[in-house]
Image (cartoon, rainbow, N blue to C red):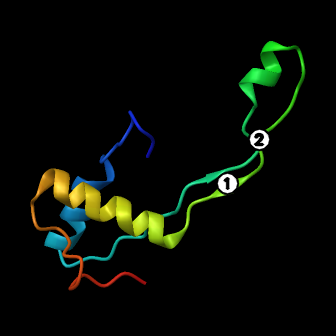
Amino acid sequence: FDEKWRPTSFYPKIKYNRLGGMHTLCLLDIKVKEPDFEAMMRGATKFLPPRYMSVSVAAEQLLEAEDTHGEGVYHGTKTLCV
């Protein structure tokens, strides 16, 4: 997520799976070899350092999506995440 972009397109997929008694594999976001646009504007080819989403950030985003949709797909203290 960032300040203006907070997608929740994953939420209906997880809801569908939970209603069907199925599990959902959520892959955490990674950013590797992302171009540095400021360097590119100066004519240099440079990449930003790699960034990896932590499990706690992923859990926060899942709970935020639940707050946004409010359909009871997950509960912060009752839903198991491994």
The three-letter amino acid code for the residue at tag 1 is: Arg
**Quarter of image, res 66:** bottom left
Residues marked 1 and 2 touching at CB (< 8 Å): yes
Q: How many numbered discs?
A: 2
Say which mark, if any, is on residue 12: none
At 90% from the left and 21% from the top, the residue drawn is 44
Does 2 sit above or below residue 78? above
Residue that appears at 17% across and 68% down? 73
In the drawing, does residue 36 fall left or right of residue 79?
right
Q: Residue at x 35, y 42 (%)?
A: 6
8 horizontally vs 49: left or right: left
Please identify the quarter of the rendering in which residue 3 is found: top left
SS at mark 1 in the image: strand
Q: Which residue is mark 1?
A: 51
Counting from the top left corner in percent of width and height, residue 80 is at: 30, 85
Mark 1 vs mark 2, CA separation in Å: 9 Å
Residue reaching furthest to the right: 44
Callout 2 amino acid: Leu
Query: Residue at 24% of width from left, 68% of height from top?
Result: 17
Residue 48 tag number? 2
Please state the horizontal and vertical placement of residue 5, each as a whole percent of the image: 39, 36
